[in-house]
Amino acid sequence: MVSLLMGNYWMAVALAYNCEFDKALSLFDKALRINEAAGSLWGISIMKSSISYFVHHFRGDMDASHRMSLEAVHLAEKSGDSISKAMAYASYGSACYGRGHLEEANEYLSRAIEACERANMSSWNASVHFCLGETFFDLGSYEKSKTYYAKAIVILEQNEMFPSWTNLNRLAFARAKARHGEKDIDLRPFGDYVTANKIRLCEGPMSRYIGEVLLAIDERNAPEAEEWVQKALSADHRNGLMLHMGRDFRFHAELLHRRREKHAALEAMTRSTEIFRGCCALRDLQEAEKVMATYV
């Protein structure tokens, strides 16, 4: 029974990173049912955290991610189990970030870091640091953002885990530097990061981050940034990453607006808002609507 449970769990995680979310959900559900039959509060919490994060959060259903991870927090705290609490805080903090509740995201992701470090959960710890990097990036706190991306890179490198995820953090770090106005960014490895990538989940975000870096460094890089955002749109559509696709359209709208293609920019931003609304990504939606109002 234990081997069946663990087999279902780790296969589900692998499928989620490969963006096969329905297959992953089916296996997570089997593992969840086993824990429910056993009456294991901490086991149920772990599975709900995993479904929230690896399925709903990854593909951009922030309402479902938020609801299920909150259930996981309540179960984990009731059980008192340290591992389930670490995962629940991480998944709930990530869901809060996705919905745009950034202060609450910061609170729970910070709790998750403490819990992950006590339980020596390196993979989850790296993911939490990445999400905090994203949170502070969205808040415009680029120095803090860089600190969390850098820590995620250190954790991943020290534990020799997920080179593709490490490279995604490197690109995120470069994006924060560029947005902060720093110009000492070595662009040469970027193409190699994309070529070496083994995780489908990273394809679109990697491409958009590169485009954002290029544009932030120099507006004359807009044509190359356009090529990268088109790659991001294609990858995120193919992989079913809706929140990322909304952000791709938003960035594409910015590029089109800079080229004074007002109608096309408005269409792209409209598409972005539609996706954010469907994802329940409330802060992204509000920000996109503010920008779109200036296009009319």
Image: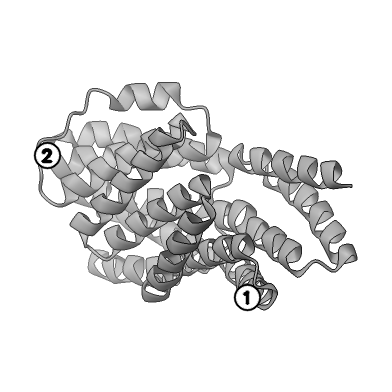
Q: Residue at x 54, y 55 (%)?
A: 119
136 to the left or right of 178: right
Residue kind at label 1, given as amino acid type: Glu
Amino acid type of disc 2?
A: Asp
* Residue 76, percent from left and from top: 65, 71
Q: What element carries label 2?
A: loop
Residue 295 relative to residue 249: left or right: left
Q: In this view, does 247 lie above or below 91?
A: above
Of residues 198 and 75, which is closer to you in this image? 75
Residue placed most toward the observer, 200 or 78: 78
Residue 165 in sight here: yes
Depicted 267 relative to depicted 81: above or below:
above
Q: Distance between the residues labelled 2 and 1?
A: 49 Å
| Mark 2 closeness class: few <14, some 14–19, many ≥20 residues within 10 Å | few
Which mark, residue 142? none
- Work out which residue is located at the far front of the displayed protein and give it: 118
> Residue at point 32% right, 32% down?
227
User: Which disc number belongs to residue 218?
Assistant: 2
Residue identifier under label 1: 77
Q: Which residue is drawn at 30% across and 66% down?
A: 292
Image quadrant containing the C terminus: bottom left
Q: Where is residue 34 in the image (x, y as percent from the top left)?
A: 86, 57
Q: Is residue 80 above or below residue 128?
A: below
Q: Which of marks 2 and 1 is nearer the N terminus?
A: 1
Tag 1, which secondary structure? helix
Q: Where is residue 131 in the image (x, y as percent from the top left)?
A: 41, 56
- Which of pointers 2 and 1 indicates the residue nearer the eye? 1
